[in-house]
Image (cartoon, rainbow, N blue to C red):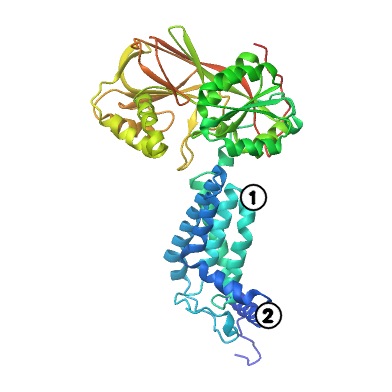
Amino acid sequence: MSPDVDLTIPVTGPRPLRTALLRLDRRVFEAVAARRWPGADPLLPALSRAANHGVLWCAAAAALAASRTPRARRAATRGLASLGVASLAINTLGKRTVRRPRPALDPVPLVRRLRRQPITTSFPSGHAASAAAFAVGVALESPAWGAAVAPLAAAVAVSRIYTGVHFPGDVVAGAALGTVAAFAVRGMVPTRAQLLPPARPRARVPALSGGDGLVMVANVGSGTADRVRALCEELPLAEVVECEPGEVAAELERAADRARVLGVCGGDGTVNAAAEVALRHGLPLAVLPGGTLNHFAYDLGVEDVRDLCRALERAEGVRVDVGRFASGGRTGIFLNTFSLGVYPELVRERERRSHRIGGWPAGVLAAVRVLRADRHPLEARVSGRRRPLWMLFAGNGTYHRRGLAPGRRLDLADGRLDVRVVHGGRRPALRLLSAALAGPLTRSPAHAAVRVTRLRLTGVAPGTLLAYDGELTETRGDLTLEKLPEALTVYRPLSGARPCAATPRPSA
């Protein structure tokens, strides 16, 4: 072999790149250690310690929940859930996969160092992962709260480099993992924005600058004081009428005589009464949630005063379906749900105790008492066959479940009643639970679900308790349920929705 032949094989592949990245990582770490940051010496080490074991983020979640707004509470819950997933991934996979040693502390000034140095491996940064997971989780549910939390999360991530416990690459990898965890949680439990119904069919509604032309009836029994004050600040020209629960119906009728837009602030029962008046007078309805249950407002995408004010000032509205029931000459409407059987009994038991022990404890106690009681199922003739029923549920629109999220309506104008029946038989509690966990279109020996436009029930005993939108009444015999498609015009914020031409409301 000739000595002039060069048999050197060039080194290719990831090793030179990896070496270069590690060298760059160390240089950035040393540059941060050598740089003096005014005011950071007392702050960043303390912030880094506060984030140990997620304490800082639990405190932040508590602060969000204390704001007492549904969006903030959901954001706090999502942030903590994302943090939990990120921590699980870090502790089970991250730290055990790449066993990178911690940086040498020689270039780090003594005043910056933590009193207790971590003993785990360096890659990736668990603190950065938790910070990113919490901040991104909050932002996915509420961009405004996410923007408020983001600087704190960034400061925690930087503090890990500043105190000398992590290389910059560890922090970047941890933040990336935390972000992935937040999006993974969103995949399992969709955000409210993902569950909003489509912004259709659009309706022509008047734009109310400053609230001029709006008459808002507020049920003070629903604890609406804070929201009413906020509404008056945002819409100074609106007329607000505060009244006791027993006066709501009369005030709504009087308000409809002088309003361009009828407004209501209260729970689902109060909104139901307002919708009936709005339908009768041909008025658009503006709903501000203010009660214990606000399913209709939340399904519309109206959660607070800002949502409603934006829709009122921008003339954003849609038409939605209404459910109607009739029994022995008595008629009524429902915007959310109608039910017979066990559920109305549960509502009655809950209302008896809620003023003494609170809504949720009363609901739990009522469920236990109703399911343990020795009772016979309801008897009714459905589709020509007489059936024993533990419960009949009819939703105004189809209730869906996405991921682990509770059922919600994705379309408030789908023209269908979502009817679910739990058949009579042994073990009613087990049958009701299986029906609650089942999808919207299932059939089994225990329960069934169908989508229809009209349903007639015969053979229902007069005096049978029924519930509609959380309100209770009694039947007068046979029952008919039907849909009123696109009957009610309501304001809802359409920001971010796909624009489309407004369509006139059809004549009655």
Quarter the N terminus occupies: bottom right
Query: Eyeballing the image, is 469 above or below 402?
Result: above
* Residue 501 shown left or right of residue 424 in the figure: right
The residue most toward the bottom is 3
Q: Residue 58: x and y, percent?
A: 49, 58
Q: Is residue 276 above or below residue 407?
A: above
Note whether residue 320 is visible.
yes
Residue that appears at 48% across and 78% down: 117
Task: Give the mark nearest the N terminus, 2 or 1.
Answer: 2
Residue that lies at the very extreme toward the right in this rendered image: 209
Residue 315 figure quarter: top right
- Residue 130 locus on image (x, y percent): 52, 62
Q: Is residue 376 above or below residue 95?
A: above
Give me the disc on residue 406: none
In this view, the residue in front, 227 or 106, is 227
- Asked whether, in this view, residue 420 is left or right of residue 82, the answer is left
Q: Which residue is mark 1?
A: 144
Question: Three-letter amino acid code at disc 2?
Answer: Arg
Q: Spatial distance from mark 2 to mark 1, Cα to Cα?
A: 32 Å
Q: Amino acid at mark 1?
A: Ala
Residue 337 x %, y %: 47, 25
Q: Position of residue 253 (x, y in %)?
A: 61, 17
Residue at image coords 53%, 35%? 223
Task: Assign the C terminus to one quadrant of the image.
Answer: top right
- Name the secondary structure under disc 1: helix
Question: To which residue does mark 2 refer?
Answer: 36
- Residue at position x 52%, y 63% from top? 56
Is residue 124 among the parts visible in the rendering?
Answer: no
> Is 469 on the left-hand or right-hand side of 485?
left
